[in-house]
Image (cartoon, helix red, strand yellow):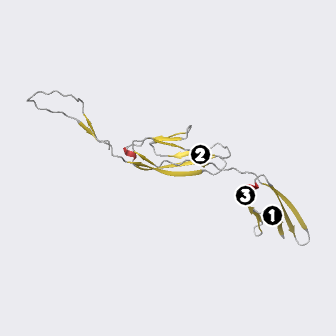
Amino acid sequence: IIKPTKLPDWLTWDGENRELKGTPSPTAINSEEKVSIFLSDGKNRVTETLSIKIIKGNTPPVFRFIPLTSINKGSNYKQEIDVYDSDGDDVHLTYSKPDWLTFNPTTNMLTGKPGNDDIGPHKVQLNITDGKSAPISTEYSIQVKNINQSPEIVISKKKLIINMNETFEFPFTIRDPD
């Protein structure tokens, strides 16, 4: 017969697997629990006492920003990637992004200016870790919207002089950025 006694509320005994199981709550941090385990073979009895000290474990880092998910082509995109680690651990960030974006690791800023070839959705994936916990990931899509840009007439000379009774020919260029 094996049986623990004086179990705290957060701890349970799994007699089939002979395991103590549980997760202490944050209110138990910095406390120490004493658990006695009673063992008997029917003739002899033994009691062992465990001392379980609860300490604050590592808290994983978190993302703290709302992503900008829509932009017009030709506009400047600027997104600060704000991350926070409540333990004060250094946070390492990795990413995958569209080619038209640039990441500055000093400012944690994504910047760029999408063009005509970038119209449509673009995936951004970010991963952070403090080296003590599993990586935390977030993913979002930036929709680059097409806006109609005005066509242009390119004229090399704006003031012309022509002779009467001569044929007038004047080439000019039309550009449509779209």
Q: Residue shown at 48%/47% (left/top)?
A: 68
Mark 3 is surrounded, within 10 Å at the Cα level, by few (under 14), some (14 to 19) or many (20 or more) other residues, namely few
Q: Position of residue 165 (x, y in %)?
A: 8, 30
Q: Residue shown at 39%/43% (left/top)?
A: 115
Quadrant of the rendered image containing residue 88: top right
**Quarter of the figure with the N terminus:** bottom right
Mark 2 is surrounded, within 10 Å at the Cα level, by few (under 14), some (14 to 19) or many (20 or more) other residues, namely some
Which element carries disc 3, helix, strand or loop?
A: loop
The residue under label 1 is which amino acid type?
Leu
| Label annotation for residue 83 | 2
Which element carries disc 1, helix, strand or loop?
A: loop
Task: Compare residues 30 and 53 and report the one nearer the observer.
Answer: 30
Query: Which label lies toward us, 1 or 3?
Result: 3
In the rendered structure, the answer to whether residue 167 lies left or right of residue 14 reads left
N-term mark: 2 or 1: 1
Q: Residue shown at 18%/28% (left/top)?
A: 160
**Quarter of the figure with the C terminus:** top left
Q: Are marks 2 and 3 in contact (CB under 8 Å)?
A: no
Quadrant of the rendered image containing residue 175: top left
N-term mark: 2 or 3: 3
Q: CA distance from mark 2 to mark 3?
A: 25 Å
Q: Which residue is mark 1?
A: 7
